[in-house]
Amino acid sequence: MAHTVVHFEIPANDPEQLAGFYRRLFDWNIEKAPAMDYWLLNTVDEGQPGANGGMMKRQDPQQSPLNYYGVESVEEFSRKVQSLGGTVVVPKQAVPQTGYFVICLDPDGNQFAPFEDDRNAA
């Protein structure tokens, strides 16, 4: 597996306003997800190189953008992160019918999220 960025998230004080900024800046197709306080950022067409993302209301003043990296197993990578001096700050979470993620900090305090694709996640 290539372990590349598979998704990214941008926190926003006003998601609708920031969505307009990115629409005009990059011509991204941005739509509010049904029944969620989450906006889908479609930056590339299905099957094309690149990653799509999401935007949500900022949950903390210090919240920064977050990259999700594809991995074979979030449990395996959680152990690997810790063995290399990193920290798991959010344990394994499911994204229903999509996969699992953990949020980690590297030894310099930068956050990132290993993501395991699993359409059976619940």
Image (cartoon, helix red, strand yellow):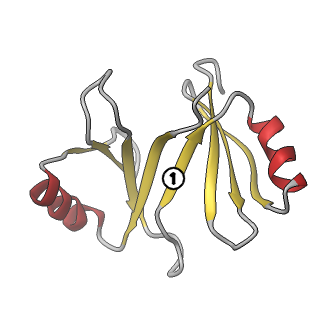
Relative height, residue 94 to residue 36 (above, below): above
Tell me where residue 34 appears, x and y as whole percent: 33, 38
Q: Residue furthest top?
A: 120
User: Which quadrant of the figure has residue 108?
Assistant: bottom right
Residue sitting nearer the eye, 121 or 47:
47
For disc 1, the neighbor class at 10 Å (few under 14, some 14 to 19, many from 20) is many
Count the numbered circles shown: 1
Task: Give the residue drawn at x 51%, y 70%.
Answer: 59
Residue sitting nearer the eye, 99 or 52:
52
Task: Give the residue drawn at x 51%, y 58%.
Answer: 66
Query: In the picture provided, is 27 more to the left or to the right than 91?
Result: left
Task: Give the residue drawn at x 24%, y 28%.
Answer: 45
Query: In the picture provided, is 101 more to the left or to the right than 44?
Result: right
Tell me where residue 50 appears, x and y as whole percent: 35, 37
Tell me where residue 90 appears, x and y as whole percent: 73, 56
Relative height, residue 60 to residue 90 (above, below): below
Query: In the picture provided, is 78 more to the left or to the right than 24?
Result: right
Task: Give the residue drawn at x 12%, y 49%.
Answer: 27
User: Which quadrant of the figure has residue 103?
Assistant: bottom right
Residue sitting nearer the eye, 28 or 40:
28
Q: Image quadrant for the N terminus?
A: top right
Helix, strand or loop at mark 1? strand
Query: In this figure, which residue is indicated by the disc labeled 1?
Result: 67
Tell me where residue 117 appears, x and y as whole percent: 60, 26
| Residue type at numbered disc 1 | Asn
Q: Image quadrant for the C terminus?
A: top right
Q: Residue furthest bottom?
A: 61
